[in-house]
Image: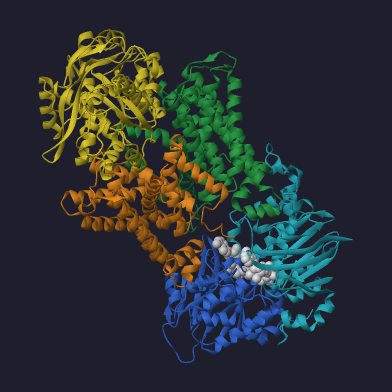
Amino acid sequence: MSLLKVERVHKSYNGLQVLKNVSLDVQAGERHVLIGPNGAGKTTLFHCMTGTLPIDEGVVTVNGRQISGLPPYTAVRVGMARTFQKNNLFDNLTVEENLHLAIAACKPYRFHFFKPFYKYTDLLEEAEQLLKQWDLWERRACVVNQLSYGEQRLLELLLALASKPRLLLLDEPTSGMSPAETAQTTRLMQSMPRSITLLVIEHDMDVVFSIADRITVLHHGEVFLSGAPEEIRGDERVKEIYFGGGAPLYAEA
Amino acid sequence: MKKETVALHVAFVAATMLLPLILTSYGLKLTSEVLIIAMFVMSLGLIIGFAGLVSLGHAAFFGIGAYTVALISEHVDNTWLLLIAAVVTAGIVAFLSGLMFIRSSGAYFLMITLAFGQMLYAIAYKMEGVTGGADGKAVSESFNLGFGAIESRLAFYYVAAAAFLACYYLLRVFLSSPLGKGVRGIKENESRMTALGYNTHLYKLTVYSLSGMMAGFAGALYAYFNQYISPDLLHWMFSGQALIMVIVGGVGTLLGPAIGAGFFVILQNYISSYTERWPIIMGLLFVCLVLYGRGGVIHLASLVWSHLQSKRRTGREKSVLPKEGSGFESLKG
Amino acid sequence: MLKLDRVHTYYGNSHILQGLSFEVPTGTCVALLGRNGAGKTTTIHSIAGLTPPRQGTIAYRDKSISGLPPHHIARLGIGLVPQGRRIFPSLTIRENLTVSARDSGDTEAGRKRWDLEAVYDLFPILKEREHNRGTQLSGGQQQMLAIGRALMTNPRFLLMDEPSEGLAPVIIEQVGEIIDRLKKTGLSILLVEQNLYLACSVADEVLVMNKGQVVWQGSPQELLANQDIQHQYLGV
Amino acid sequence: GSQTASGGEGEPVKIGAILSFSGNFAPLSESIKEGMELYFELHGNQIGNRPVTIKYEDDEANPQVALRKYRQLVDSEKVDLLVGPISSSVVYALRDVIEKDKIVLIDANAAANDISWDKKSDYIYRVSISNWQDGTPGAAYIAQHVGKRAYVLAPDYPAGHETIQAFKEAFTKAGGQVIKEAWPKLGTNDYATYLTEILETKPDLVFSFLSGTDAIRFVQQYEQFGLNGRIPLTGTQEFLDPLVTDPAGKAAEGIIGATMYTASLDNPTNKAFVEEFTKKYKETPNYFNVQGYDAAQVIAKAIETAGSTKSEELIKVLKTITFSSPRGELAMDPNTHNLALDMYVAKNVWKDGKIEQEIMGIAAKGLKIPETPPAASK
Amino acid sequence: MVTSSLLMHILNGLAYGMLLFMIAAGLSIIFGLMNVVNLAHGAFYLAGVYIAYSLVARHMGFWPSLLVSVAVVAILGVLVEKWLLERVYGRELEQVLLTFGLSFIFADLVEWIWGSSPLTLPVPEALDVSLNVGGMMFPAYRIFVILVGCLLAVLLWYIESKTRIGAIIRAGVDDREMLSALGININVVFTCMFAVGAALAGLSGVLGGPIMGMYVGIDAEILVSSLVIVVVGGLGTWKGAFIGAIVIGVVDTLGRVWFPSFTMAMVFLIMIAVLLMKPNGLFGRGAAA
Ligand SMILES: Nc1ncnc2c1ncn2[C@@H]1O[C@H](COP(=O)(O)OP(=O)(O)OP(=O)(O)O)[C@@H](O)[C@H]1O
Ligand SMILES: Nc1ncnc2c1ncn2[C@@H]1O[C@H](COP(=O)(O)OP(=O)(O)OP(=O)(O)O)[C@@H](O)[C@H]1O
Ligand SMILES: [Mg+2]
Ligand SMILES: [Mg+2]
């Protein structure tokens, strides 16, 4: 059953056509990776799926519910969560406060205004668990703008995980992470239960090939190719536009 | 809550309640006025410091509260009803204007709220038949919550003090609640809040309306207190003063704006009766506050505090500035 | 070309660089590796004058530059490709490139002069979109812009903080080639990278940092051969 | 005041002055202060045998601030009586508390009519002019000597409306006709629209009530647009006062109107006043100076006559007080608590590089504000 | 209405708009471009006109007085920027308090030195004539102000599009640190531009004085109308301030004729209407994504 369905989406930025007739099907439980040259429109597609940007034409449905045209926070209501390519954090809050906000977003009590935050113990516990799991527990009281870039990237990922989504959209989660953190993140993605569906944009081929069930290549705003990892790896045209033919910089996993 | 915190709160409330013991009759009156204005400034501090909505038209809601009492008291004399009417009217106007304006931000929000306030000012000024026009209107209704009319200064002081404390603790609870935290998150990074699944518009609208209601409440009390209202209560100059009080007290704190109100009103009152050159002195004070106190009395206090602390701890290097908003607020939860 | 001698840098009270010393010889590329939070960016910022070190000296062409204001340091010929791109959002792409453009003071033979045309040649997409705002580019395109912007100052020494971040593999290759080419024109480069393979393919020497100190130093081949170091400090 | 059991020999008389020292009204306030100080200085800073202290407070022309300052003066400083505000809204704001506290206020400027009518108080006495008295007296002369079809212009605020209303009534009665009214907002800085309109409507004359900077700008722009000399400009006494004519300069030449005071008035009190004033302040007195001077004079005289500073004693005296002002011999009208004023027709003339007022006749003698609002004006 | 008089009203509106533009030009640099909330704009205006007044009163002649006074205000601008503002870049609310305090100090100093009575700066003699425009008289001085307004527009356009200064300042507002790491002495650039903005305020004081008059209190009026214009036009573009001023000048002027009972709120009505339709002003750049 397809969880996320993108049908014939068009998007242009005042005149510049960025997405042309993009259709995409992501099955529940699938690990789907989106690759493509810089500027192919991957991030834009994410924006369109989550409602961050309105789409010109086309339909996006999650689990049969249309979410295109609705405000972006509704995407979270249907179980979608995303990260940003460019860090988009609460720079002046601490790591912990960042997480609290993210976790509370999906709690029924997010509108309550009569009980102090710290009395919602479930929330505090969830945050603690996540922080410990990701080695950020010691940094919990650190204000975000004092974190190193890589640490911020990690937090970016945690904010998306915090809402316990069914469908997780990750925009270059490992960029800016050191190999160690990259490996950790990769392991996390591999070990996630299949109840969580992943759609990932990634330029690190090690990561791509170690998680992907299916890969879609976007080029000039169009779906260039979509298929199993082996198919993509072997494709000459993809090599030309994306992988590059020269020296094999990448050790293949 | 920690023990010391509880003690602090008890001391705070007790101090407010015992203040009349050391005040002269005039001091009592002035302090009551300061408390009412502090409530208003606190409501502005709420949207500025916690939601990032810098308004230059907040006096509109204060004025609406005051005018509601003044106008309706000609027909109704139940104080409860009048207060509720004032709060509700201010809240409704805040909600509706918020619906229109909240998508603007920064300087644009500042100016559109200024314009809105000025429109209301113009209305109050021009509709002489209803509002008394530029000459204002006397309010003859006395304050009566059902335990007899409150006429004495002392009694009214307690009304103002109780109202102030109630507002303060209400906001404290609000700010530490999930809703309040959400509002602060929006100030920090609205786009991320949206992506996390918050309906940021609704949050902003809620806090804006709440703030308008509180301003309206303060305005209603002010009408009782002063027994006279005039369009000046709606004018942007008053909004501007309130804005300055918020900054003077300390943006991003709850008590800061209230302290700013007291600081501003009392200081200006006394300096201006000693010298005609009071604007220079006030101006210099503001400049110094920015240069040495990060713009707020409360921030200044926290700087001094952390300085003292770090002196005690030897071997420590220069102290880091406290981050905005988490400054000295010993009453913080 | 550049020499750091027992450099200590702090953020407020936190001691980040703890006596860092290394050297970048003229015309070479030195790669700086390390885990997140190791202090790589802080090193770069200390050299560029953004977080001046509290102790130790940084010498550039045998003159101390520690304590100079950033713009002064930059004018000595040190260019910066910052981490996270830091494109100026309210400038167009063209303005982003030209805002700080200048000729290097000297005209050594063989040094390529970078101007708009040269940068546009390198990254044609920038020319296509030159009147768009900087932030209207995709992430990878912004990285290209950041590299172009640094080149436009015609530096003799280039600080690159994770230049390959967010770039597609083909472009990373291209960046590798660019670095090679820059080296050939006599430029020296301090390269911070997470991409071990890119770093090893272009660097003449590799430094591994941990907790504000250099913990390992050697040639790329040595590093690739040394699984221990890779594992211990890079987590590979 | 009523609260202090005052009256003791040698104990100072404390006067509280609520004026607007910051903002547009500052020059008026300074002028009133100058006048008061001159009077007390000339009288040994004493009333009877008691020294006088005056406490000045700045109300910023804001009624809310004024109330705060009022409380400070009355509760904390315990002043014996008050000298009153510049702005009408302030006098309205103070009126009820004054009634309650039973403290005397000598109104030295605020001109609102209603303070003599519905809002009349036993404790408030005006030594300046009311809007009605300002608008009325010139009308007859203008209708007879200047022209019948008038374009009137005044700022859109209560004083403007009250003054123009009074003028209109008197003017129509004298056979004139107002062909157009213009109500620019208070503080308009560009009158071009109205000047163009005047050129278009071609009235016989323009009658205007404007004060302070509005008046200066209007007069100057009137000249810049070439109207001066083409269409006669007339107005209230504001146009005939050095506060406006000095800065406006030659542009003010030729303006005609009725005024209660000019420095050239020929009476002994004025001669002495002008001499002393010029000696002390090195400039020609304006009518605000006279208001201040007279406020001081009325206070002194009332306290001396009553032999006390008790409000109840004072008001008995104040109701019918008479005194010789630089404006002539004046008497309080007990029915309105407002003076009966002699009004003069005057014209701005250019003399020795300066505008001076030339008196051309008497517009009204002993002009009192009516006891109740004239039928049309409410 | 007769067409000729409609034309006349529009001319009045244009002239008024250009006067407003002249007054707001300095703020459009300091606030619009440099993002400094400068509530002392009116104070610089005040300083300009009062200094010029004193010089003219000492028979210095209008034009030399103008130059001297503008220079003095520029120096004042440098001092304010170097000593005070430099420490609060990027912190708007502290700027508000700082410049508010400054405006208090300046205004009160002016009152202290020159007294509170309104004064006037005479129209320079050569321009003190009325021209006949279609049968109506129009002051030559206003035509001069229109020309100055146009010149200023050209100057701003030049700064914006022909020099790197505009770009440098915008970049400096975005990310000071980064810009200085690219070799630009951002402090000097900001100081200079602030001085230029202050000088323009002073200039508008001297040139606006003969029309607007001079008194303590006009600083607040100047400040508000300048803010309105810069915001209605949209922050950060000279075009915005220019068109914004003309729109406000013309609509306000015509409004006095057609809707006389709305004169009090006219400007604010325009502002609300514009900002509801275009939340970033007429020509404002959208919030940086
Ligand atoms: N706000 C914008 N306005 C105009 N054009 C834009 C905007 N954002 C992106 N673009 C353009 O749209 C195209 C697609 O951008 P997008 O960010 O989706 O690319 P991407 O596939 O995510 O690339 P990358 O791998 O470099 O992140 C690019 O050519 C980019 O320049
Ligand atoms: N502004 C700051 N204030 C306080 N501490 C900071 C600040 N910036 C960075 N740090 C701390 O300094 C340490 C080193 O950071 P730095 O940015 O140099 O790391 P890095 O090696 O570049 O890491 P990354 O690979 O993640 O970019 C980190 O622990 C970080 O938390
Ligand atoms: Mg992208
Ligand atoms: Mg880094």
In the rendered structure, the answer to whether residue B83 lies left or right of residue E216 reads right
What is chain C's hue in the picture?
blue
Q: Please provide percent x and percent y for residue E236.
A: 47, 58
Please say if A69 is above or below D196: below
Q: Quadrant of ligand 1?
A: bottom right
Label the green chain with its letter: B
Q: Which residue lies furthest to the right in this view?
A: A1
Q: Who's the residue at 76% across and 80% down the image?
A: A238
Tell me, by letter, which chain the rendering colours cyan.
Answer: A
Q: Which of B220 and D10 is in front in this view?
A: B220
Q: Residue at x 46, y 30 (%)?
A: B126
Q: Is residue E129 visible?
A: yes
- A51 relative position to B275: left or right: right
Q: Where is residue B290 in the image (x, y as percent from the top left)?
A: 42, 49
Front one among E269 and A99: E269
> Which residue is at 71% across, 44% downward?
A110
Q: Name above or below for residue B158 compared with residue B55.
A: above
Q: The yellow chain is which one?
A: D
Q: Front-most of A61 and D372?
A: D372
> Chain E drawn in what color?
orange
